[in-house]
Image (tube, rainbow, N blue to C red):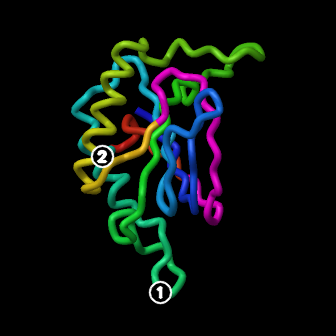
Amino acid sequence: MRVVVQRVIKSDVKVDDKVIGKIGSGLCIFFGVKSGDRIEDLEWLTNKIANLRIFSDEHGKMNKSVLDIDGEILVISQFTLYASTRKGNRPSFIEAEKPERAEEIYNLFVENLQEKIGKPIQTGVFGGDMKINIVNDGPVTILIDSQLKW
């Protein structure tokens, strides 16, 4: 699994010009699943995200997590995180998990992360055509890959 985590002031997701998910201060997370990813890695990944210290403390240092600031989370499915551009100019998505299994893992990811932060998580529509508005704070953007955890 691969995520792009952005610290945001606010973010929302629209489908057919209708806002279906909206957050204030917190994290906008783009989530992708690679073929062969293990469900067992969800626990590690959600712990890492919930406790990731990328919010400023009273001294301006990144020492606080989304839990510490009582922040919100918006999760967007994004298979394009596994785009390969090694050959040619058209990305290949052969490494991305098949949609049925990817959706199952995506739903488990959202549920697990929701348990970790103790509040509802906003989402887009799995596999949908979405428009994402992000006001990145910093900017702070972090890439986390579950296959690189060791």
Q: Position of residue 136 (x, y in %)?
A: 63, 57
**The label number, if any, that marks residue 58 in the structure image:** 1
Q: Is residue 29 left or right of residue 49?
A: right
As measured in the structure, the alpha-carbon distance from the residue carrying label 2 to the one carrying label 1 is 26 Å
The amino acid marked with disc number 1 is: Glu
> Looking at this rendering, what residue extends furthest in the bottom direction?
59
Where is residue 85, by image quadrant? top right
Residue 118, compared with residue 144, is above or below; it is: below
Question: Would you say 107 lies left or right of 77 here?
Answer: left
Q: Which residue is mark 2?
A: 113
Magenta stretch encompasses residue 65:
no
**How dense is the environment of label 1, judged by Cα within 10 Å: few (below 14), some, or many (20 and up)?**
few
Residue occupying image coordinates x 52% and y 24% = 79
Q: Nearer the viewer, residue 119 or 103?
A: 119
Horizontal side of 12 relative to 77 (left or right) equals right
Please tell me whether mark 2 sits on a helix, a strand or a loop: helix
Residue visible at 59% across and 35% down?
A: 18
Q: Is residue 135 magenta?
A: yes
Start-end of magenta stretch? 124-141
Q: Is residue 57 above or below residue 3?
A: below
* Kind of residue at badge 2: Leu
Label disc, if present, on residue 34 of the rendered structure: none
